[in-house]
């Protein structure tokens, strides 16, 4: 009676074989993935989430500064997401000073460790831009 094959055991075995076929997680590089992701042009950002359609709404720069504030408040947990947001904010017309002030103001609610981490990530983007100039 117990000679019937267990379908879950077969499924588990198949999953193990599939896993062996994939490259190891060590082969994945977040830095390479981040470099592949581009920055949207300012006009595209305004069209998608700026005030092009909603004339009385927030512009893309302000929305991105608010996003930076939110990410800082959450502890700037993802360096890739934070740097991408800073890149887009700069493209949308924010200055380094705008971004630094946004992060500093948010530190009142998020704390100094979050502010320090956020400023570190933003500084990496600022340094990239200085290298490009």
Image (cartoon, helix red, strand yellow):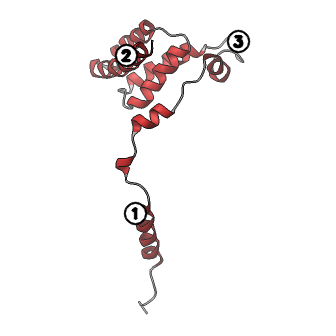
Marks 1 and 3, Cα distance to the nearest angstrom? 53 Å
Image-based side of 91 in relation to 115, left or right: right
Q: Which of 13 and 107 is in front in this view?
A: 13
| Residue shown at 46% from the left, 87% from the top | 4
Outermost residue on the left side: it is: 113
Marks 2 and 1, Cα distance to the nearest angstrom? 40 Å
Q: Which mark sits nearer the N-terminus, 2 or 3?
A: 3
Q: Please state the horizontal and vertical placement of residue 122, each as a whole percent of the image.
A: 38, 18
Q: Please state the horizontal and vertical placement of residue 34, each as a whole percent of the image.
A: 45, 33
Which residue position holds label 1? 20
Badge 1 vs badge 3, beta-carbon distance below 8 Å: no
> In the image, which is nearer the foreground, mark 1 or mark 3?
1
Image-based side of 85 in relation to 50, left or right: left
Q: Give the class, few, some or many, for how many residues have Cα within 10 Å of label 2's Cα (few <14, many ≥20).
A: few
Marks 2 and 3, Cα distance to the nearest angstrom? 34 Å
Which residue position holds label 3? 55
Which residue position holds label 2? 127
Q: Which mark sits nearer the N-terminus, 2 or 1?
A: 1
């Amino acid at each position: 009676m117990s000679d019937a094959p267990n379908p879950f055991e077969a499924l588990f075995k198949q999953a193990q074989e599939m896993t062996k076929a994939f490259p190891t997680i060590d082969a994945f590089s977040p830095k390479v993935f981040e470099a592949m992701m581009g920055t949207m042009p300012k006009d595209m950002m305004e069209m998608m989430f700026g005030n092009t359609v909603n004339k009385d709404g927030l512009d893309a720069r302000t929305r991105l500064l608010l996003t930076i504030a939110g990410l800082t408040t959450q502890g700037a947990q993802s360096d890739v997401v934070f740097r991408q947001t800073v890149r887009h904010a700069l493209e949308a017309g924010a200055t380094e000073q705008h971004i630094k002030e946004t992060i500093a103001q948010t530190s009142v609610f998020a704390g100094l460790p979050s502010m320090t981490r956020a400023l570190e990530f933003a500084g990496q983007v600022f340094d990239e831009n200085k290298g490009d100039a």
